[in-house]
Image (cartoon, rainbow, N blue to C red):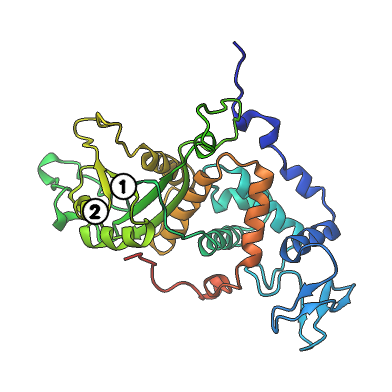
Amino acid sequence: MTHKQHFLLSAKARTLSVRQVFELTEQQAFETFREVRWGGGEAVTCPTCGTIGKHYFIRVRRQWRCKDCNHTFSVTSGTVFAFHKLPLKVYLAAIAIYTNAVKGISALQLGRDLGVQYKTAFVLAHKIRESLMEQRDEAPLSGEVQIDGAYVNGHIRPKNKKEDRIDRRLAIHQRPGKRCVLVFRQKAIPAALQAGSAANDSRNDSAIVGANKTLTFIVKSENQADIVSLADRAVKRGSIVCADENSAYDPLHARYDTRRVNHQVEYAADDGTTNNLAESYFARFRRMQYGQMHKFGNLYLDNYANEAAYREDTRRWANGKIFTDILAKCMRTRTHHDWCGYWQGNKRQAERLAA
């Protein structure tokens, strides 16, 4: 019997290293940005008027001047990295480090790795998260979809004396900043079954197993109104929905083929119903919370939750493919109001709740 190597331990999973990025020249970094944003060739797109063509290139400044509107732009103009002050190679290195951190990376660690101050690393990491959030695929899920919720920022430290302690389960004692991360996970269909084959090829380590698409939403609590609203938005009719015994999911029976598992009794029902795919997402989410970030602010909780979802969905991708995908998403994301002059007071004013 031959030993089956896990895909993440194979050479196919390691197609990029941070060392390779730091060995790039600034010209090579510039060409990488240009190729990902506009592809090969000499044609580029003016971010102001949208003219596509061979614009006048100012070689010393690595900028173009539009032949139509005369606007001068760079390879990052109009993107989330606009007005950059660091060398382009540093931004590529930041994405490479971010890619290889499978459970997320704190701004403090990113700043140490890049040799920049905490404030710079904080904004840079959040620009990447914002790009992942804005460019995520929000097409409804189908097939078997598992739903679950987990609460953050609700811990109340108990008093030292037993007689001074409160019942932390009661609503009147809950923290006002307590939020629920609601996850919808679509179960992957093995490629062999999609092709109508009777047997799955067990030699394909990179084949997606478990879930292949994850959508997250932030709500104040698991309640029937929000669950129904988000399910109508995120799950196609005719799908199978798996949930736990929480009464918030009761109305789904009228809309979908809903199957339940009572976690007070069992992890999986006798008919095989489970929501372990949703639980596996929260396993990574909690490790990112406790092991890296330590605290998620409600203001950007949606970005953190989506980051964990992205890492789950790309867990069987080579790191070079993830790197290119993240860079492409950053190039497609417009200059973001929340992250342009963040430390000068230009911040998001309210959290983004899904319902």
Report how far apart the C-alphas of labels 1 and 2 lie in the structure. Answer: 8 Å
Q: Is residue 62 left or right of residue 135?
A: right
Query: In the rendered image, which residue does mark 1 sit on?
Result: 241
Q: Quadrant of the C terminus?
A: bottom left
Query: In the rendered image, which residue does mark 2 sit on?
Result: 252
Q: What count of labels does the image hold?
A: 2
Up-down relation of residue 183 to residue 137 (above or below): above
Q: Nearer the viewer, residue 100 or 118?
A: 100
Compare marks 1 and 2 and give the one earlier in the sequence: 1
In the image as oriented, which residue stretches furthest toward the top? 1
Give how far across and how far down residue 317 sits, in percent: 61, 42
Q: Secondary structure at mark 1?
A: strand
Give how far across and how far down residue 326 sits, in percent: 62, 55
Visible residue check, residue 87: no
Q: Residues within 10 Å of mark 2 (few under 14, many from 20)?
A: some
Visible residue check, residue 301: yes
Callout 2, which amino acid?
Answer: Leu
In the image as oriented, which residue stretches furthest toward the left? 163
Q: Residues within 10 Å of mark 1 (few under 14, many from 20)?
A: many
Up-down relation of residue 147 to residue 63 (above or below): above
Give how far across and how far down residue 286 sits, in percent: 41, 43
Q: Measuring 33% from the left and 39% from the top, which residue is drawn there?
A: 275
Q: Measuring 52% from the left and 43% from the top, which residue is drawn there?
A: 103
Callout 1, which amino acid?
Answer: Val
